[in-house]
Amino acid sequence: MTEAALLSEEITARHLAVELVSNPTALCEAQALRFLVFSEECGAVLPSAETGLDQDSFDLYCEHLAVRDLNTGRLVATTRVLDSQRALLAGSFYSEGEFQLVGLPQLRGEILEIGRTCVHPDYRNGATISVLWSGLAQIMNERAYAYLMGCASIPMGDGGVQAQAIMQRLRERYLCREWLNAIPRRPLPELDIPPNVTAQVPPLLKAYMRLGAKICGEPCWDADFNVADVFILLRREQLCPRYARHFKARAS
């Protein structure tokens, strides 16, 4: 990235602030942004489509982080988090609907699940993600969660070629079933692809890998969103030192 681009992102970040959603109006803003990205942009089939909002039963139990543009008041990025205690109230973690998480009860320490992460098309840059991560880092630091887990998506618009190519790369460096074995409830359709096919790892998935996360199994096909969901697990004690410093510094 050029010096000019870095300066531009730094200036942009000054006009952005992260917040925990604290009222129904702000929650609707987050759900409307999710609908814009997942339904209108990506073509996901959502049961709440007639409302113009992306809503599900887990929203009631999750906490919702949002990034707001202070100049316009617009909510421009959001993610939701669900910890172990709230998951008990919800009946499960969201990820358990897609994966059988073998070993989950044996994990020692509190767990924070992240999901439904999205950024408005006009704000897809490093500054916005850094501000969103700062809120997540603050929550993890203040509450001392031992694990961060969730799903990162790979588009399936090409029938799965990209997903299979990306998984070939991920298996070599990031596959680890030592702590959890994530067995997909709906595996990807079998597809033979040449070994020389290349594909770009989606930004969110790449960010998790840089932080030190591992993938815990094969992906699940989410037919409603038409994506391959990869289950990731990040152990707090194994945060990549380079990015751990950045991650924690953003929370101070």
Image (spheres, grey):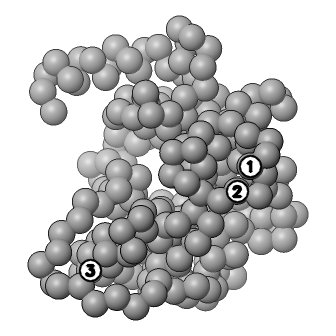
Residue 66 lies left or right of residue 53; in this view the side is: left
Compared with residue 75, is residue 196 higher up or lower down, i.e. above or below? below
- Mark 2 crowdedness (10 Å alpha carbons): few <14, some 14-19, many ≥20: some
- Where is mark 2, residue-wise? 46
**What label sits on residue 168 in the rendered view?**
3
**Residue 107, image quadrant:** bottom right
- Mark 3 crowdedness (10 Å alpha carbons): few <14, some 14-19, many ≥20: some
**What label sits on residue 49 in the rendered view?**
1
Compared with residue 178, is residue 233 higher up or lower down, i.e. above or below? above
Mark 3 vs mark 1: which is more N-terminal? 1
- What residue do we see at 43% from left, 27% from top? 122
Circle nearer the viewer, 3 or 1: 1
Q: Which residue occupies the foreground of this view, 252 or 3?
A: 3
Of helix, strand and loop, which one carries label 2? loop
Q: Amino acid at mark 3?
A: Gln
Q: Amino acid at mark 1?
A: Ala
> What is the distance, in whole Å, between disc 3 and disc 2 at their CAs?
30 Å
Compared with residue 97, is residue 152 higher up or lower down, i.e. above or below? above
- The percent coordinates of residue 45 (x first, y second) are 65, 59
